[in-house]
Image (cartoon, rainbow, N blue to C red):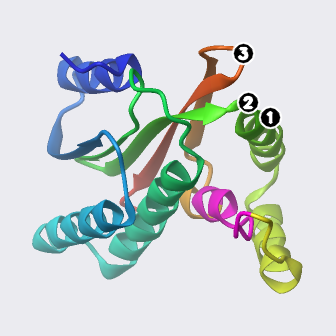
Amino acid sequence: MISNKYAHNQISGLLTEEKSFTDLFILLGSIDKTMIASSIQIIEGKLKALNFPKKLITKTKLIGVEVLDNILKHHSDNPSEQPYFEVVIHEKELKISAGNCISKKDYLFLSETLADYLKLSEKDIKEKYMLQMKTGGFDDQGNAGLGLLTIIKRSVGKYKYNLTKKTDEHYFFNSSIKINFLN
C-alpha cells in the first residue's frame, strides 16, 4: 500500500476510472536532480516512440521539468507524505499530476499567486511572463519566478491545483496539467 494518501488516491482513481489510458509513468518518493533528468529522458523517449509531434514533446518536457523542479525546491519533509509525479497518456490528451508537502510560507505564496495567475487571460499570462523575463531577478533562493508562469502559460487553461492543510506548518500541494494533443 502506498503510504502517501494523495498519491494513493490519485493512482487508485486512475486505475478505476472509465477513461482508458495507454501509458503511465509514476515517480513516488524523494526526488533529486538526477531523477528529474532521468524522468524527463524516459518521458521524452516514450513520446518519441509513440510518434508524438516535437512541439508536444517540448511542451511536456518543459512543464515536467518545472513541476519536478518545484517539488525539489519546495518540498517540506514529511515521511508519511512523500512527493509523487505522474504522467498519463490518454487517447486525446496527456496529463501531468504531482503532489508534495510544502511549508506554510510556500502555501501562502502559492494560494495567493495561483489565484491571481489563474484569473489572467492567456494574453496577460504571456505578457506577465515576458515582463518577468525582462525585469525579474532572482530571489534569495535562486528563483526567477518563472516556474508557475511557465506551467500556466504552457497548459493554456488546463491547470488545476488543491492545497490541503496537514498541520499548522505543513500543507499538501496537488496539481494537474492537461495537455491536449490538438494544441
- For numbered disc 1, what is the local secondary structure? helix
Residue highlighted by disc 2: 104
User: How many tags in the picture?
Assistant: 3
Location of residue 42 by image quarter: bottom left
Type of amino acid at the residue the image marks with label 2: Lys
Residue stretch in magenta = 141-152
Q: CA distance from mark 3 to mark 1?
A: 12 Å
Location of residue 132 by image quarter: bottom right
Circles 1 and 2 in contact, beta carbons < 8 Å? yes
Q: Are there few (<14), some (14-19), or many (20+) residues within 10 Å of tag 2?
A: some
Q: Residue at x 17, y 72 (%)?
A: 45
Query: Is 50 covered by the magenta stretch?
Result: no
Instruction: Describe residue 108's horizontal placement relative to residue 63 as left or right.
Output: right
Q: Position of residue 51 (x, y in %)?
A: 16, 73
Q: Which mark is residue 168?
A: 3
Residue highlighted by disc 1: 108
Instruction: Describe residue 107's horizontal placement relative to residue 6 as left or right.
Output: right
Can residue 183 be seen by looking at this rendering?
no
Type of amino acid at the residue the image marks with label 1: Leu
